[in-house]
Image: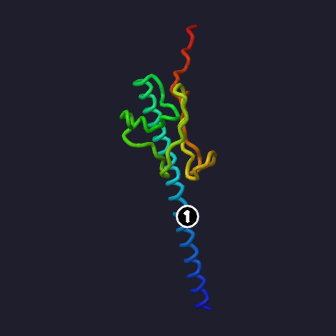
Amino acid sequence: MARARIENLGFFIFIFALNMFWAGACGVACIRSDTRSQRHRVEVRHLHNALALHRLNHGAFPTTQEGLDVLVRDKELESPAIDLWGRPYHYVSDGGWFRVETYGADGKPGGTDADADVGVDSSDLMPSAPHEAQ
């Protein structure tokens, strides 16, 4: 009888420890995912600022054909624009507007959490309309 209680207690402790391990692992994964998402937002904002600087220096955004590598060549970025999964950012521009984004962990448009798209476009550079005097 005492042996059965000890075995049950051992099994309970094993299951409890296993659950604690999984809870910790899931917590770390959630924190890592959130941190990665925040880092992408910062990097995309950095690209946004480099593109704004390029427009100030050259009168237009780089075209899709020129790509983001022109920002490195012109020293508006220190290194090529690569997302946290080692893929180039998606960039589209006709010189007058742009859209730059990453498609997240899965590399596909759409998604949630780590697979969510993060991006900005040139409309974020446009100043808001001045308020009319009353």
- Residue at 54 percent across and 15 percent down: it is 130
- Residue at 50 percent across and 41 percent down: it is 41
Residue sitting at the far front: 65
User: Picture quarter containing residue 69?
Assistant: top left
Q: Is residue 111 above or below residue 52?
A: below
* Image coords of residue 97 (percent x, y): 54, 27
* Image coords of residue 96 (percent x, y): 53, 25
Specify how the rendered protein is coloured: rainbow
For residue 103, side relative to residue 53 (left or right): right
* Image coords of residue 110 (percent x, y): 63, 45
User: Picture quarter containing residue 118?
Assistant: top right
As rendered, which of 69 and 82 lies closer to the eye?
69
For residue 99, side relative to residue 51 (left or right): right
Regarding mark 1 in the picture, which secondary structure is present there? helix
As rendered, which of 127 and 93 lies closer to the eye?
93
As rendered, which of 16 and 121 lies closer to the eye?
121
Q: Residues within 10 Å of mark 1 (few under 14, many from 20)?
A: few
As rendered, which of 125 and 73 lies closer to the eye?
73
Residue pointed to by mark 1: 23
- Residue at 42 percent across and 24 percent down: it is 58
Of the 4 image quadrants, the one containing the C terminus is: top right
Residue type of the residue flagged with mark 1: Ala
